Image (cartoon, rainbow, N blue to C red):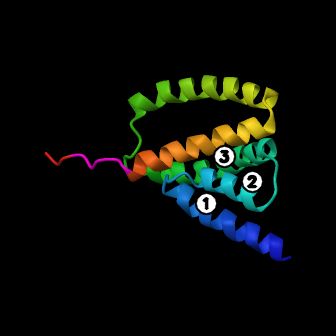
Amino acid sequence: MGRFLLAAAVGLATGILSGFGVGGGTLLLIYMTAFAGVEQTAAQGINLLYFLPTAATALPAHLKNGYVDKKTALPAILAGLIATGIAAWAATGLDVQLLRRCFGAFLLYIGLRELFRKKPKAD
């Protein structure tokens, strides 16, 4: 019962972050692989299923408030679909340990980039 409550709490917290567009799915992946003992490939599949309803519930609010640039969205969606298909195919063929290392390196890179990013100058 305790594991279920913890998983539900993590799902709730990452859902809130996803609604804000922060990347709650990435945090969910970290929880599943580092703390819940879920294999990387299974965690990625769960994360994809998790993303669909969270994105679907956040999208209407973002559209209503004008936060979606529709001219940019279509090419980004098409490129994202193609890249997702290629990456999913590649991920199923990679060793799980290599996949974990690549994901860890990606997280470190993004974290360091955000940590040392210079704020843009106001006009």
Q: Disc 3 or disc 1, which is closer to the eye?
A: 1
In the depicted structure, whether residue 21 falls above or below residue 78: below
Mark 2 / mark 3, whichever is N-terminal = 2
**Residue at the image point whose x is 82% and y is 57% from the top:** 37
Residue type at mark 2? Thr
Residue type at mark 1? Gly
**Residue at the image point whose x is 54% and y is 29% from the top:** 77
- The C terminus: image quadrant: top left
Distance from label 2 to label 1 (Cα)? 18 Å
Residue 117 x/y as whole percent: 34, 47
Of 7 and 49, which appears nearest the observer?
A: 7
Q: Is residue 35 left or right of residue 74?
A: right
Contact between marks 2 and 1 (CB within 8 A): the answer is no
Q: Disc 2 or disc 3, which is closer to the eye?
A: 2
Look at the image and give the residue range highlighted in magenta. 116-120
Residue 120 x/y as whole percent: 24, 46
Seen as rendered, the residue at the extreme bottom is 2
Distance from label 2 to label 3 (Cα)? 20 Å
Which secondary structure type mostly characterizes the magenta part of the structure? loop
The secondary element bearing badge 3 is classed as helix
**Residue at the image point whose x is 54% and y is 60% from the top:** 17
Contact between marks 3 and 1 (CB within 8 A): the answer is no
Task: Please say whether residue 119 is one of the residues in the magenta stretch.
Answer: yes
Instruction: Write down the residue under mark 1.
Output: 15
Instruction: Write down the residue under mark 3.
Output: 52
Instruction: Write down the residue under mark 2.
Output: 33
Count of numbered badges drawn on the protein:
3
- The N terminus: image quadrant: bottom right
Distance from label 3 to label 1 (Cα)? 11 Å
**Which quadrant of the view contains residue 92?**
top right
The secondary element bearing badge 1 is classed as helix
